[in-house]
Amino acid sequence: MKINMSVTNVEYSLKESDSIVSKTDLKGMITYINEDFLRVSGFTREELIGASHNIVRHPDMPPEAFADMWKTLKENRPWTGMVKNRCKNGDFYWVLANVTPYYENAQLAGYMSMRSKPSREQINAADAAYRLFQKDNPGNLKIQDGKIVKSIFLAKFNPSKRLTIKSRLINVIGLLSVLMMIIGGLGLQGMSKAQ
């Protein structure tokens, strides 16, 4: 993983109207950027197009966040999470990143990222949690689908978490059918004893 070490403690605060957009190919190489991306990051178009998107990666970002992002994207699902990025001059900025696969001619072509200004509460929460990951001491925290969540031991053994919605509905309908048969059977048994 690339570590961009030239950093300052100066935060660049996004405007409410900022909407940072970029596209990458399947390997994370930048193919498109908008003007807000150029203005906020401080990089030139020539420095960004064709470069790996991790050119703006801040060293305070835990590798677990990007591992989670790539896992989610490889499952063909969108990812939303807090990201601390690095400007060219070493300053940093926080974004709420929404990354999704995009298609051209029915083929997966790459990934599109739209980033906006997060609230100060979102920044503070992410910063505190990411510091724990960086210190290798996240406790029971994990990053799942871009969110920082508490890991529950029993959740690892939950067989339904891998099921599709259709499979879950079939299971619920099957369970309800079995319960109806049991209740019907008990009712019939009660009626026969009453006679």
Image (cartoon, rainbow, N blue to C red):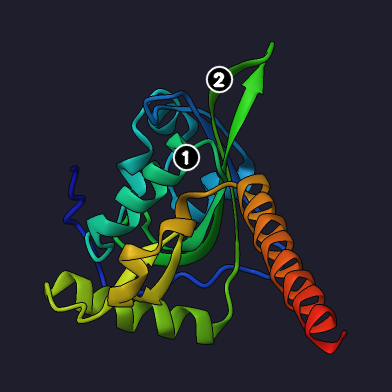
Residue 113 placement, left or right of 28: right
Q: Secondary structure at mark 1?
A: helix
Q: Nearer the viewer, residue 72 or 112?
A: 72
Q: Amino acid at mark 1?
A: Leu
Q: Residues within 10 Å of mark 1 (few under 14, many from 20)?
A: some
Q: Which mark is residue 73?
A: 1
Quarter residue 133 falls in? bottom left
**Mark nearer the N terminus (1 vs 2):** 1
Image coords of residue 61 (percent x, y): 28, 62
Cβ–Cβ below 8 Å for labels 1 and 2? Answer: no
Q: Is residue 106 above or below residue 54?
A: above
Q: Residue 113, how many percent across, how many down? A: 56, 44
Q: Quadrant of the C terminus?
A: bottom right
Question: Total number of numbered labels?
Answer: 2
Task: Please state, as top left, top right, bottom left or bottom right, where the N terminus lies in the image.
Answer: top left
Question: Farthest left residue?
Answer: 136
User: What amino acid is labelled 2 in the image?
Assistant: Ala
The image's mark for residue 47 is none
Q: Secondary structure at mark 2?
A: strand
Query: Circle 2 sits on which residue?
Result: 109
For the point 18% across and 49% down, which residue is it? 3
Query: Spatial distance from mark 1 to mark 2, Cα to Cα?
Result: 12 Å
> Residue at horizontal 47%, vertical 40%?
73
Query: Residue 117, how many percent across, how many down?
Result: 60, 68
